[in-house]
Image (tube, rainbow, N blue to C red):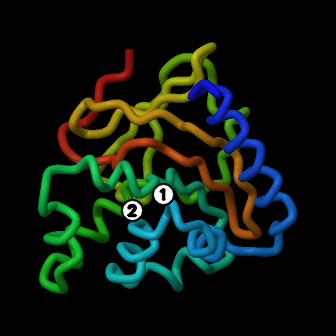
């Protein structure tokens, strides 16, 4: 079975599971999926679980565990320390928009979006090859699963942790 076929099957399974579990918040959906265990731990350590369980609406660009594992060694452990709670909150709020943005609401081409970390911007590009997000480092994350519906918003699964930095250039 090739990797693309496996990805499609996984996406269909998650979409199906999310549809049947529609009566959950973003936090509940993430907590029920082992691929988001690092994200869930980070949200808890930052004290954001209650906020992201609130009425929203929210759009969360949710990195999978492999995305956190790809960060330089020690980064996650350092961010999870109580003395780094502010920095961790900033990184996490960089992944959240205070609107419900389904994939079809992202215009074709490249557009700046303002996350809840209001000092920063994301450049989101939508095209024939899917949706990509440039973070403050200029690196690109791919939306690998779009539009997991929650009671208080929508989750787009991404393959990279978005990091604040200099504002990304939209092309």
Disc number placed over residue 93 in the picture, else none: 2
Q: Which residue is mark 1?
A: 96
- Compared to residue 106, the image places residue 67 above or below, namely below
**The N terminus, quarter of image:** top right
Q: Residue at x 69, y 34 (%)?
A: 8
Tell me where residue 145 sits by quadrant. Answer: top right
Q: Residue at x 65, y 42 (%)?
A: 146
Q: Are marks 2 and 1 in contact (CB under 8 Å)?
A: yes
Q: Estimate the x, y position of residue 36 in percent, counting from the top left.
A: 49, 64
Q: Is residue 81 left or right of residue 171?
A: left
Q: Residue at x 33, y 79 (%)?
A: 46
**The C terminus, quarter of image:** top left
Badge 2 density bin: few <14, some 14–19, many ≥20, Cα 10 Å:
many
Q: Estimate the x, y position of residue 121 in percent, counting from the top left.
A: 35, 42
- Compared to residue 4, the image places residue 77 above or below, namely below
- Which secondary structure lies at badge 1? strand
Q: Estimate the x, y position of residue 165 in percent, counting from the top left.
A: 19, 44
Q: CA distance from mark 2 to mark 1?
A: 5 Å
Q: Residue at x 35, y 58 (%)?
A: 117
- Which secondary structure lies at badge 2? helix
């Amino acid at each position: 079975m090739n990797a693309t076929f496996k990805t499609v099957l996984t996406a269909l399974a998650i979409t199906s599971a999310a549809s049947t579990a529609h009566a959950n918040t973003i936090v509940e959906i993430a907590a029920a999926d082992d691929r988001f265990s690092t994200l869930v731990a980070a949200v808890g350590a930052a004290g954001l679980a209650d906020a992201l369980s609130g009425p929203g609406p929210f759009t969360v660009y949710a990195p999978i565990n492999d995305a956190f594992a790809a960060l330089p060694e020690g980064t996650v452990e350092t961010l999870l320390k109580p003395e780094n709670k502010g920095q961790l909150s900033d990184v996490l709020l960089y992944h959240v928009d205070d609107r419900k943005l389904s994939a079809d609401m992202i215009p074709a081409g490249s557009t700046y979006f303002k996350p809840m970390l209001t000092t920063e911007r994301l450049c989101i590009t939508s095209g024939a090859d899917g949706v990509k997000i440039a973070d403050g480092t200029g690196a690109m994350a791919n939306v690998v699963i779009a539009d997991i519906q929650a009671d208080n918003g929508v989750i787009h699964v991404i393959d990279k942790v978005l990091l604040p930095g200099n504002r990304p250039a939209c092309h």
